[in-house]
Image (cartoon, rainbow, N blue to C red):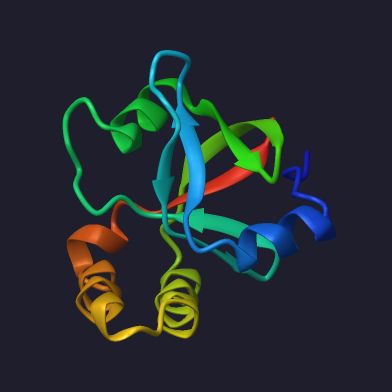
Amino acid sequence: MPRRRFTASQASEIAETKYFRLRAGDDHKFIAVWAVVVDGRVLVRPWNDKPAGWYREFLKTGSGAVKIGMQEVAVHARPVTGEKLLDAMDAAYARKYTTKPNNPYVKGFATRARRATTLELTPA
């Protein structure tokens, strides 16, 4: 069965949003993260991989929600491992987050440890 994808308008809004709001599981609160869209796929990485953080909660439950505009959308999350997609995500971060204060984060998100925490979000 093919994975569901966000609609083109949802993906466009996510691509244009600098600080994307997501919630992992049911007990976490919505937080702002960096998200990019690569070939219609919504991708996120945590800056910090905390034991009780959103990334670990997504690994445990596989589900959560995102805010697209005023709409809350239930999502599933799955790890991404393909080098080609991870490289494209690094490039997408560099194109989207271009201010001087963003530079250390763009470089940091491209490290091996952070690339290993990449998740794809899909509508539930």
Q: For residue 99, which quarter of the picture?
A: bottom left
Residue 57 picture location, percent across and down: 35, 26
Work out whether 46 lies above or below 109.
above
Residue displayed at 43% across by 75% down: 93
Q: Where the C terminus falls, by quadrant?
A: top right
Q: Where the N terminus falls, by quadrant?
A: top right
Determine whether, in the image, residue 90 is placed left or right of residue 117: right
Determine whether, in the image, residue 97 is placed left or right of residue 71: left
Determine whether, in the image, residue 66 is placed left or right of residue 82: right
Residue 98 picture location, percent across and down: 40, 84
Furthest residue to the right?
A: 8
Residue displayed at 20% across by 43% down: 49
Residue 36 picture location, percent across and down: 53, 65
Residue 42 picture location, percent across and down: 59, 56
Residue displayed at 82% across by 60% down: 8
Count of numbered circles on the image: 0
Work out whether 24 lies above or below 115.
above
Furthest residue to the top?
A: 27
Residue displayed at 50% across by 43% down: 21
Work out whether 11 lies above or below 3.
below
Q: For residue 122, which quarter of the picture?
A: top right
